[in-house]
Amino acid sequence: MVIDPVDPAYGFAMAEFPVSPSGWHAHFIGTALAPGGRVAVLTVQEGTQSGCPVVTMVMFGENGAIDAAFGQDGRASSAMLGLPPCAGAAGLAIGQDGAIFFMSGDVSSPTSSAVWKARADGRADTSFGNRGSAPVPGVDGFTRPTLQVLADGGVAIGGTARLAGTETWGLAVVRLRPNGSPDTAYGSGGLAFAVPPNRPIFVQQGGGMAVNADGSALVAGNIFEDDAGARTYTDATVARFDARGMLDKSYGQGGFAIPLPDASTYVQSLAVRDGVAYLSGVQNRDVKSVFVVKVDANGRVDLRYGDAGVAGTYGFYETNFHPIVAVDQDHRAHYLILEGHLLPRVTRLTRDGAPDATFGLDGSAYPTIDGWRFDWRGDLRLAEDGRLYVVADDVTPLDGANRAAIAVMRFKDDGGHRDGIAGGTAVIYYNASLDHYFLTANPAEQALLDNGITPGWRRRTGEEFRVVTSAALEPELSPVCRYYGRPEAHLDSHFFSAAPDECAAVAQKFSASWLLETSQAFQVHLPDRTTGACPRGSLKIFRAFNNRADANHYYGWFAPASPSGWTYEGYGPGPIPTAFCAPLL
């Protein structure tokens, strides 16, 4: 792997879960860092024979192995945690003493939620509340709640919540004392609750909550742009409550910061450092994208950050609808998205919002697991010592076996950065008049094509992949030769191969019709010639031949996008063998 961000001392921590005949299996609900470098993952499995969800908490040890001293063989079940029948779970937080808090059903009221507490060994702490659970006062439920253990051993719960006995949703923080009773000195009976005037809450998306060192709390959520019409568009917002649970009207506009007004944005996660809020979210109107925005301690967008307060923008796909952000002590934001081809990418931004060139390649790195793929969103957690943990929800085997797992990876401090490596993007173009495809990773050529300087080639197919463009040959990579089919041979086309023997064969057999333009257009991995499998940290690239005298080839990672009737070429079993493997950069 060219850029390998995973710390080999930790490796890939995985916990497999059974898969039901209908395909249901455990899904990630929450993550928390425990003392001693341990990582807890809370999961819920639905679609069970009983029809009830099953809650399981897994604890990974400091070295990545499952902590057998936790629960039973590293797993705490619903029964161990003391949960009522058919209860689900949400949120997760762990204190410095190892005490575990999460949300689930209230044993005394099926329609209400409660905070549950477990000991560090994964068993219910019956000294908390009513035999391990305490009802959440003032609200009938949270959507995607965030929990934080307080300095006194109590717990705060925050997010979007519905006021008890009403249909009113707002941004809320609830505080419970260490024994589980409401902190009546906070807000109204332990509840802080607010809705911006004439701006109803949009319930269905995420947010977050963080309690600052001074006791104030920031809560992120989403509000409609106005209260009229179809309520189509939303704004991401952050509210601040003071240490007494009162809305701090000196923050932003009357207690609410709206960093990107009238831009149709959703906030999906919140990270706070020294009172400064970092929101990761999605813009789903106009130029759709995901982003990180920085809000200063007064509730105003920090215009010095990134591009007028916004950084880390990336094209929107359905898979990256849940971008996650975490911020270290140096105010470097770490940002997780899932790219369109289900590839997780972590980007580290500098304090001013630029990609951190000392991390990964150009600020980004891809955590991958040999033989497994990510199927949905994950999570990020930053330890106080700066170590970054990436949690993968719902990883499944590449061989199609009926298995599923949750995985945790710890990153190297530099994200696998290597000096001297340069990366580029190979883009595929289409010429309709010729019915030809062309591939180039050369920025100058791309500019000519994009600007219409070369007639007929302005259209990008949308297919592109990353390559290494460094001049020096990397030992784990293979240079890609590029041949040009001579017009006098009625060709006017290009051919690429990463296999040295195939490059040599073209020169030996077809030198009269094919001209070698370069023996190193870029560098990629070679697949296994028998199986067609790609090395970890690379993406299969397919090549298809048009079977015509003008000899054109299509290249791309999305095989069904190739033209109908063309023949796939490469290594490994059919019907779609592998031509070469693009490194994840």
Image (tube, helix red, strand yellow):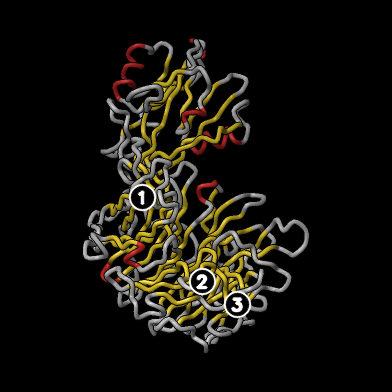
Q: Mark 3 against mark 1, which lies toward the viewer?
A: 3
Give how far apart the Cα atoms at labels 3 and 1 are.
39 Å
Residue identified by numbered label 3: 193
Q: In which quadrant of the rendered view does residue 539 lie?
A: top left
Q: Residue 579 carries which label?
A: none
| 366 and 95: which is toward the camera | 95
Q: Is residue 71 visible?
A: yes
Give how far apart the Cα atoms at labels 3 and 2 are.
22 Å
Q: Residue 449: x, y in percent?
A: 58, 32
Disc 1 residue type? Pro
Give how far apart the Cα atoms at labels 1 and 2 are.
42 Å
Residue 270 drawn above or below residue 26: below
x 53%, y 20%: residue: 564
Of pointers 1 and 2, the one earlier in the residue sequence? 2
Which residue, as the protein is rendered here, is positioned at the far bottom?
185
Relative placement, left or right, of 476 versus 176 is left
Q: Residue 271: x, y in percent?
A: 48, 68
Residue identified by numbered label 2: 109
Residue identified by numbered label 1: 367
Mark 1 crowdedness (10 Å alpha carbons): few <14, some 14-19, many ≥20: many
| 484 and 401: which is toward the camera | 401
Q: Residue 399: x, y in percent?
A: 33, 35
